[in-house]
Image (cartoon, rainbow, N blue to C red):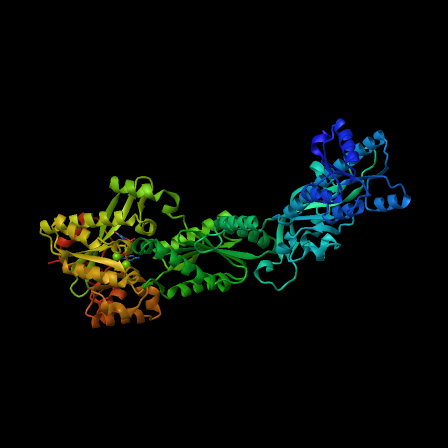
Amino acid sequence: MIKNEQNILVIDDDPVMLRSLKELLAIHDYDTDVATGGEQAICLINNKDYDLILLDLHMPDVNGYDVMQHIKSVNQTPAIIIVSGENSFEAARKACSGGTYAYLSKPYKTNELLNTVRLALREKHLKKLNSVVQHQLKESERLHRYLVNTSPDIIYILDPQGSFTFINQRIESLLGFSPEELIGKHYSILIHQDDAKHAKYVFNERRVGERASNNIELRLKCKDTDKPRYFENKMLPIELSSMGIYTGANNNKKNTYLGTYGVARDITERKIAEETITYQAYHDLLTRLPNRSLLRDRLNLAITQAKRENEMLAVMFLDLDRFKNINDSLGHITGDELLQQVSARLKSCLREGDTLARFGGDEFTLLLPKITNRNADAKKIAEKVAYVLKEPFFIDNNELYVSASIGISLYPQDGQNMDTLIKNADIAMYHVKGQGKNGFQFFSDEMDTPYYKNLSLDTGIHKALDNEEFTLLYQPQINVSSGEIVGVEALLRWHHPDLGCIMPSEFIPFAEETGLIIDIDNWVIKNALCEISQWHQSGLPEVRMAINISACHLARENFVAEIAQALTDFNVPGRYIEIEITENAIMEDMEGVIHKLKKLRKLGISVAIDDFGTGYSSLTYLHKLPIHTLKIDRTFLQVERFANDDHTIVNTIVAMAKGLKLNVIAEGIESQRQLDYLREIGCTEAQGFLFGKPVEATLIKSLLTKKPFVLPDANKPGLGLHRKQH
Ligand code: C2E
Ligand code: MG
Ligand code: MG
């Protein structure tokens, strides 16, 4: 084995000696090069790396010492056996000080020589092996050091006292400390104060195997530095795995704890992802407000606290009026933008500690803890909300007006638990909707749950349309000077098979929110036109038919075309029809509405503004509108107002209508006194129970055939209302 692998050179100036050595070695399977003299030897050494050199000292010109010198100078490390005739101690000492393996005197003993050669070759072989291993080890260490230092994780070793003996470079980019400044320091300087207790048995883990720490979450402190951004939150969430280090696996000896080895992974990204997921689970992403789940959490907590502290709290349920219209007519992007702007304004109404949540769609909920007085706190905030929503919203060149209906329930009187409080605030809110929207109401026990809160309105209305459960009643509109019926208003009733007669205020607000109102309005238009067409054909006196149209219906693009088609279908001249719309319907899209109203006018249809004075009451836009009639809302003619001589609004409306040459109808006239007053101020028409409640078609037809109403005279009190007898 050795023969073929190892290179041997024999150097002697005596050729006989040289040959005999070569032959001797050849007999024992050693293949050798030979050099006769030092000079030749140097040439060979320059070209080949020898493992063993048998060297004569005494040679002419270049002697053995010179050869050794040369070997050293070319950094070769062969084993050198001196085979020399020089027997002096001095010569041997000198030769050996040059790193010679052995010194044999000539004449040598064959066995001794062979033995020395064998041993020298073996030692050389071992040395070679050793150096390879050394090299590999160095390489491997370099590799591991590289892996450790470039690892994305923090890797550290602690001594038994908990001080760092090693920590990789990663610490610097993650926490801002250099490894050098941490060596010798106790690990606790890196631990976030809130996690100190938790870290105690983990960071300096003593256990090994399955019981050692695995994937434990901790927070580390970043170095106080003014380096921006990277360390700005001064805290790094990590996931740590660590284990104890013990002296070798010698079973006989008791193992000694040497310290801890640990790997910490930066989990910032994961934490951010987790936080985002949690945020999304508890927030509405459009408005960034708490969502229904978070509101429920907070409300539950607030109720517990209110119970403990004997306090009151309020839950406000807020629904934007006619939001669906905006969404349908201007698109979802505008609708979304509006919701964002509305939430920003709502936020401005909150006190510290209040929660505003988006409950879904256009519904918001306000939780107001620590209410001391319902009027001072809850009412004030509701008024503030109404106030901040009054100003128009500007989105993409649209000027939008929004109002809200707010229902308020109070803990403890309106409910002891979360669900009851939310339900009652919701019921109160629907009562606001039912009474014309835009405003707020506190829940009271007398409030019935509106019909549409209990039944599926969707299927209910479809069935009602299919099964002809809807009917129209007609209420006369009177000329206050002549007593003649000049028009009738078609008013809808729903005869539900189980629930009996349902009034429009019970289902129309909801139908407006869901869009079902379109089907309802179309049904009304069709039936009202059909009716008036029959009246016309049967020769009844000519009267106007007033039809209520919802804002969202008016907002539809093909509204005018549909009406025109209906007029043709039923062969009704446009002048027989008046449509009643609310102020809010106009304000939502003034330009668009004006355009449509002009088209309606071309068809002969007249337009009345219903409930005038209750909406935006902006008198400034009136002259711009192609309308014919103002209907003064009945609240302005209420008995209480008369008692207080509060006629300002009615007077203003009538005066202004005269100026604009508009027809005025006063709604809800129930008493002689109201009628007298209307005459006094020159109001031309009136409608109300005083002249007749809404009645079925047959009844109104018979009224139309009779002579005009004899209207009571102001100067003759007590005279009842009756028909003129001729
Ligand atoms: P409105 O258009 O302002 O109708 C007048 C309401 O006042 C009617 O209530 C009528 O019955 C009531 N009323 C009339 N005279 C008096 C009176 O002297 N005293 C009192 N206290 N009330 C009087 P109704 O029928 O319950 O309708 C309520 C509202 O529902 C209507 O207000 C209208 O906005 C809506 N509505 C009714 N029918 C329709 C319809 O076919 N389509 C649409 N879109 N809305 C309708
Ligand atoms: Mg009306
Ligand atoms: Mg009205």
Instruction: Report whether residue 61 is seen.
Output: yes
The image quadrant that residue 88 belongs to is top right
Which quadrant of the picture is home to ligand 2? bottom left
Report the label total.
0
Residue 376 in the figure: left or right of residue 262: left
Judge by depth and name the residue closer to the eye, 668 or 467: 467
Say whether residue 435 is visible. Answer: no
> Does residue 283 appear to the left or right of 323 in the view shown?
right
- Give percent across and percent down for residue 416: 53, 49
Q: Residue at x 17, y 62 (%)?
A: 483
- Where the C terminus falls, by quadrant? bottom left
Nearer-the-camera pick, 97 or 590: 97
138 and 481: which is toward the camera: 138
Determine whether, in the image, residue 110 is placed left or right of residue 516. right
Please state the horizontal and vertical placement of residue 38, each as a whole percent of the image: 75, 44
- In the visual, does 215 lie left or right of 416? right
Please, which residue is most extreme toward the right here?
89
